[in-house]
Image (cartoon, rainbow, N blue to C red):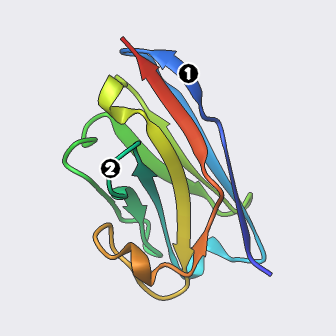
Amino acid sequence: QVQLVESGGGSVQVGGSLRLSCAASGYTFNNGVMAWFRRAAGKEREGVARIDRDGIATYADSVTGRFTISEDNAKNTVYLQMNSLKPEDTAMYYCAADPLYFSLTTPSLATYWGQGTQVTVSP
């Protein structure tokens, strides 16, 4: 049984940083795609960052240059380093995974999801 467990969320002020972690069990990272999505209150889910089996990362335009996705295959954990946080980054952040394929714009193709971790950025 695959489980994804996010952690690292919290409350920070504008310009601050957080690092989210997504620990996987029952799933091997380097055989698939991992990504972070977020959903702000009253808004649709948004793809944030994605890393594929070759280690190639892609980002939403809104976070490019501020967020970095990375993975530690030995720990079966994917990270999202978030710097220069803005109030508009406030959302619930979810980790997603699939052994085949999905993109930041096709979250419905991701098979596995975590429960989410809340990030709140205050002015």
In the rendered view, would you say 108 is above or below 49? below
**Residue 113 sits in quarter:** bottom right
Viewer-nearest residue: 52 or 40: 40
Which amino acid does the dot numbered 1 rest on? Ser
Residue at screen point 43% across, 83% down: 109
The numbered disc on residue 61 is none
At which x and y percent is residue 118?
57, 38
| Residue 103 visible in the picture | yes
Identify the disc placed on residue 11.
Answer: 1
Picture quarter containing residue 24?
A: bottom right
Residue pointed to by mark 2:
43
Specify the amino acid type for callout 2.
Lys
At 65% from the left and 63% from the top, the residue drawn is 73
Q: Does residue 92 appear left or right of residue 15 in this picture?
A: right
Residue beneath the point at 33% across and 57% down: 44
User: Residue 84 location, x and y as percent?
Assistant: 34, 22
Give how far across and how far down residue 28 sits, in percent: 68, 76
Spatial separation of the CA atoms under disc 1 and disc 2: 20 Å
Q: Is residue 121 above or below residue 111?
A: above
